[in-house]
Image (tube, rainbow, N blue to C red):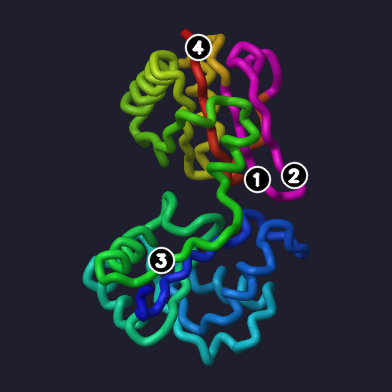
């Protein structure tokens, strides 16, 4: 067993609620034992640590910010923290290192022989897949689709074809303020029979999770998706 310090991967709530509905006690106890964190956003982290009643005040803790703008040499320097004590890696919401720049630090920890321990907590991708009724044995998460309209339409059509051929659930996301635009494009360019799942504001009080064929989505008013975190899943039959 390694005697090196451990990198803990800390999931955080997807939605902001007063009550804890997402994190088990063991995960909370590990987080409360740590005083060194690599985080995506300081403001969110400080609020989260106060929410779980971390026993150490934030001014006595060590923090480093790792986001999509953090240069590689700075990420490498974070390993100095891990040489001195256990470190917690925390994303903005949900599971760290999934659709998240924290994967760079996890890779470095493996390269240098540090134990990596993912803690139990919410993952919007898995929650959406679980609730979709689509194939959970073969699925792919694609992150964000292309911004340029022509490339995006082409990508949607290619993912739909692959789904039909490989019986694969395709999962992707969009920046919240462009959700409605993506929804419109899916209805316009997918087959009428293709199943579309929309998972929006998961774990929040106004959670929205529905799966229907495209022709049924077209027959009713569009859901309110603007400025809300959402995942889109499609599954096409032959």
Position of the N terminus by quadrant: bottom left
Q: Nearer the viewer, mark 3 or mark 2?
A: 3
Please tell me in which quadrant of the rendered image residue 84 appears: bottom left
Q: Residues within 10 Å of mark 3 (few under 14, many from 20)?
A: some
Instruction: Provide residue 188's location: percent of width, then percent of height.
Output: 50, 16
Compared with 192, 149 (above or below) is: below
Can residue 122 be seen by looking at this rendering? yes
Badge 1 crowding class, 10 Å Cα cut-off, few under 14, some 14 to 19, many 20 or more, is many
Residue named by callout 3: 116
Mark closest to the chain's N terminus, 1 or 4: 1
Distance in Å between CA atoms under marks 1 and 4: 28 Å
Rounded to the nearest whole Å, what is the CA distance between mark 1 and mark 3?
A: 29 Å
Q: Residue at x 56, y 42 (%)?
A: 126
Disc number at residue 237? 4
First in sequence: mark 1 or mark 3? Answer: 3
The label nearer to you, 1 versus 4, is: 4
Position of 171 compared to 77: left or right? right
Seen as rendered, the residue at the extreme bottom is 60
Disc 1 to disc 2: CB gap under 8 Å: yes
Give SS at disc 3: strand
Q: Is residue 157 visible?
A: no
Q: Residues within 10 Å of mark 2 (few under 14, many from 20)?
A: few
Q: Earlier in the sequence, mark 1 or mark 2?
A: 1
Q: Residue at x 50, y 73 (%)?
A: 42
- Find the distance from the CA under tag 1 to the CA under tag 2: 7 Å
Q: Nearer the viewer, residue 56 or 109?
A: 109
Identify the element where label 1 is drawn. Answer: loop
């Amino acid at each position: 067993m390694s005697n090196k310090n451990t990198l803990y991967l800390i999931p955080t709530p997807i939605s902001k609620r007063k009550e804890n509905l997402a994190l088990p006690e063991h995960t909370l106890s590990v987080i409360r034992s740590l005083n060194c964190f690599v985080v995506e956003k300081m403001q969110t982290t400080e609020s989260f640590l106060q929410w779980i009643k971390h026993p150490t005040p934030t001014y006595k803790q060590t923090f480093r910010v790792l986001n999509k703008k953090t240069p590689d040499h700075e990420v490498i320097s974070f390993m100095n923290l891990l040489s001195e004590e256990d470190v917690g890696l925390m994303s903005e919401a949900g599971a760290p290192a999934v659709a998240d720049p924290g994967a760079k630090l996890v890779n470095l920890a493996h390269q240098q022989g540090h134990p990596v321990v993912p803690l139990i907590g919410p993952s919007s991708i898995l929650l959406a897949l679980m609730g979709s009724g689509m194939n959970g044995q073969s699925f792919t998460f694609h992150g964000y689709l292309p911004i340029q309209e022509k490339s995006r339409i082409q990508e949607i059509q290619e993912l739909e074809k692959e789904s039909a051929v490989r019986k694969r659930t395709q999962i992707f996301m969009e920046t919240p303020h462009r959700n409605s635009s993506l929804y419109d494009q899916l209805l316009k360019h997918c087959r009428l029979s293709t199943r579309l799942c929309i998972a929006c504001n998961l774990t929040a009080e106004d959670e929205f999770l529905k799966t229907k064929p495209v022709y049924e989505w077209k027959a009713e008013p569009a859901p309110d998706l603007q400025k809300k975190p959402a995942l889109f899943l499609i599954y096409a039959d032959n």
